[in-house]
């Protein structure tokens, strides 16, 4: 699993970064992504720093960097996922469009939470709380999509 910065930052902000370790055994980021997430003073910094020191967030870089017109983190993460034929954890709409165009499988942060429900790590009520916490922490979900997500969690 290759990750961009937003999922790491958002999950760290709500204290759920370890879901990635539990679900996927760990994640790989590029140097560009590491530079975006390992910023002292940023919310969730200590959880991210701990994950790096524990070794379950690892760093690897693509041999060739595709210029996709995205940010440095998105470009490098998408290039690495394509190169390694790996799944990309990403939330940026333009990067998701690029991933689809390149045939790269991807997950969003919300999918991580739904996967945790499916694997019975958390229940639907806990997942709804986490989704609301993500939004409160600055994760954007359109009101219509948020309503759909929360409806799925109350079924």
Image (cartoon, rainbow, N blue to C red):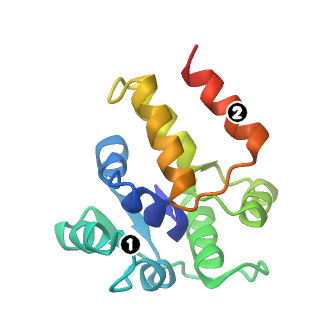
Residue 37 visible in image: yes
Residue at the outermost left position: 54
Decide: is 96 above or below 70.
Answer: above
Along the line of sight, the residue nearer the viewer: 133 or 33: 133
Secondary structure state at the residue bearing disc 1: loop
Residue position for label 1: 43
Seen at 71% across and 30% down, the residue is 148
Along the line of sight, the residue nearer the viewer: 81 or 29: 29
How many angstroms separate mark 1 from mark 2 (CA)?
26 Å
Secondary structure state at the residue bearing disc 2: helix
Q: Locate residue 65: give its quadrant.
A: bottom right
Label placed on residue 11: none
Seen at 37% across and 81% down, the residue is 38
Along the line of sight, the residue nearer the viewer: 137 or 29: 137
Q: Give the side of residue 48 with respect to residue 117, left or right.
A: left
Q: Position of residue 28 (x, y in %)?
A: 41, 65
Seen at 62% across and 22% down, the residue is 152
Q: Position of residue 43 (x, y in %)?
A: 38, 72
Q: Position of residue 125 (x, y in %)?
A: 43, 25
Residue 115 visible in image: no
Seen at 77% across and 53% down, the residue is 100
Residue position for label 2: 147
Q: Which of disc 2 and disc 1 is earlier in sequence?
A: 1
Circle 2 packing at 10 Å, graded few (<14), some (14-19), many (20+), is: few
Decide: is 106 above or below 114.
Answer: below
Along the line of sight, the residue nearer the viewer: 6 or 75: 6
Q: Position of residue 101 (x, y in %)?
A: 82, 58
């Amino acid at each position: 699993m290759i990750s961009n910065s937003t999922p790491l930052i958002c999950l760290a902000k709500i204290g759920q970064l370890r879901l990635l370790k539990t679900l996927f055994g760990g994640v790989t980021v590029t140097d560009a992504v590491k530079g975006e997430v390992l910023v002292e003073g940023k919310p969730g910094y200590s959880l991210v720093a701990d994950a790096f020191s524990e070794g379950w967030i690892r760093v690897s870089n693509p041999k060739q960097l595709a210029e996709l017109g995205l940010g440095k983190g998105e470009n490098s993460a998408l290039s690495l996922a394509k190169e390694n034929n790996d799944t990309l954890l990403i939330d940026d709409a333009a990067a998701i469009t690029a991933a689809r165009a390149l045939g790269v499988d991807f997950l969003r942060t919300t999918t991580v939470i739904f996967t945790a429900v499916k694997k019975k790590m958390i229940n639907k009520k806990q997942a709804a709380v986490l989704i609301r916490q993500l939004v409160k922490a600055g994760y954007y979900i359109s009101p219509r999509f948020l309503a759909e997500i929360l409806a799925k969690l109350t079924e």
